[in-house]
Amino acid sequence: MYKLARTDKTPVTLRALIPQRQVGKIIGTHGQRHQKIESGYQVKMYFHDVGDRYGRLCSIGGSPYNVACAWRDVLELIFDYVTIESYFVYIAFLIPGELAAHLQLIPSSLGDGGCILHEISDKSKCRIVIEPKPLPNTSEHIMRVSVNTMTAHCYKMFETAVTGIAQQFRIHRYKALSPHNIYFTPGCFTRPIEESDQDDEDYICRSSTTSPLWSNTR
């Protein structure tokens, strides 16, 4: 079971891919919004110099709770124009395959046969979907954390989900920072493809819940 400990100062970094056209909303005029997020939550936010067809890589580092609050603000800035109730808005986080597979093996404390990510999803009421295939030439998968509308309540739901995920990155940092991980960088899909010895069946969600973490949809 994860714990939402606001006093936990152990740093963690969550990386995500931001649509290119939305980056300016986060940075703001002369970097004002970027700086406000950093100073307001005592985090460090970095944008990769260039983007590619997947988007612009953004990293936010700090305590799990503060990182979650920062990503909540990013979500609000990106989707400030969305008002349609059925439109799911999300952040496309990156998670190493080794960590994702490991988290599937940690049982939920809810007794529903699911894993820890299902527990986070259930408690936050957010949808968490991990793409079954890693990004080209990496071992990282896209993990979408989404809510169905932008309200104050949904912001809080998203914050809760991302805090729980950040806690898992911190607790299992030996998986998150494994030397076997091949991290995504913009343009890496142009490198020669490296064959993986990991069978696809290893990335099938073992949970008995009706909402699979691993999705074949994009």
Image (spheres, rainbow, N blue to C red):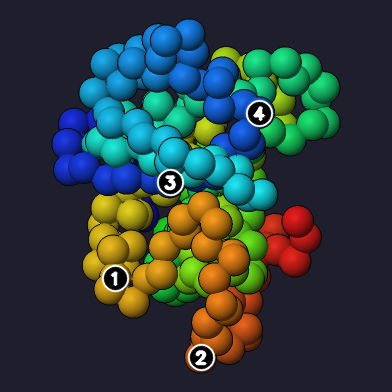
Residue labelled with disc 3: 15
Looking at the picture, tell me which residue is in the foreground, 144 or 184.
Answer: 184
The residue located at (72%, 15%) in the rendering is 81
Give the answer, above or below, for where 195 lies relative to 206. Answer: below
- State whether residue 65 appears in this view: no
Residue labelled with disc 4: 21
Q: Position of residue 120 (x, y in %)?
A: 49, 48
User: How dense is the environment of label 3, judged by Cα within 10 Å: few (below 14), some, or many (20 and up)?
Assistant: many
Q: Earlier in the sequence, mark 1 or mark 4?
A: 4
In the picture, the disc for residue 11 is: none
Q: Earlier in the sequence, mark 2 or mark 4?
A: 4
Whole-angstrom CA distance, mark 3 to mark 1, is 16 Å
User: How dense is the environment of label 4, judged by Cα within 10 Å: few (below 14), some, or many (20 and up)?
Assistant: few
Whole-angstrom CA distance, mark 1 to mark 4, is 32 Å
Image side of residue 35 versus residue 71, left or right: left
Query: Callout 2, which amino acid?
Result: Asp
Query: Callout 4, which amino acid?
Result: Arg
Q: Position of residue 27 (x, y in %)?
A: 47, 19
Q: Which is closer to the viewer, label 2 or label 4? A: 4
Looking at the picture, tell me which residue is in the foreground, 119 or 126.
Answer: 126
Whole-angstrom CA distance, mark 2 to mark 4, is 36 Å
Q: Check whether the beta carbons of the residues at disc 2 and disc 4 lie within 8 A of each other.
A: no
In the picture, the disc for residue 178 is: 1
| Tag 3 secondary structure | strand
Residue labelled with disc 2: 197
Give the answer, above or below, for where 97 lies relative to 82. Answer: below
| Tag 4 secondary structure | helix
Q: Which is closer to the viewer, label 1 or label 4? A: 4
Rendering quarter of residue 68: top left
Query: Callout 1, which amino acid?
Result: Ser
Looking at the picture, tell me which residue is in the foreground, 23 or 130.
Answer: 23
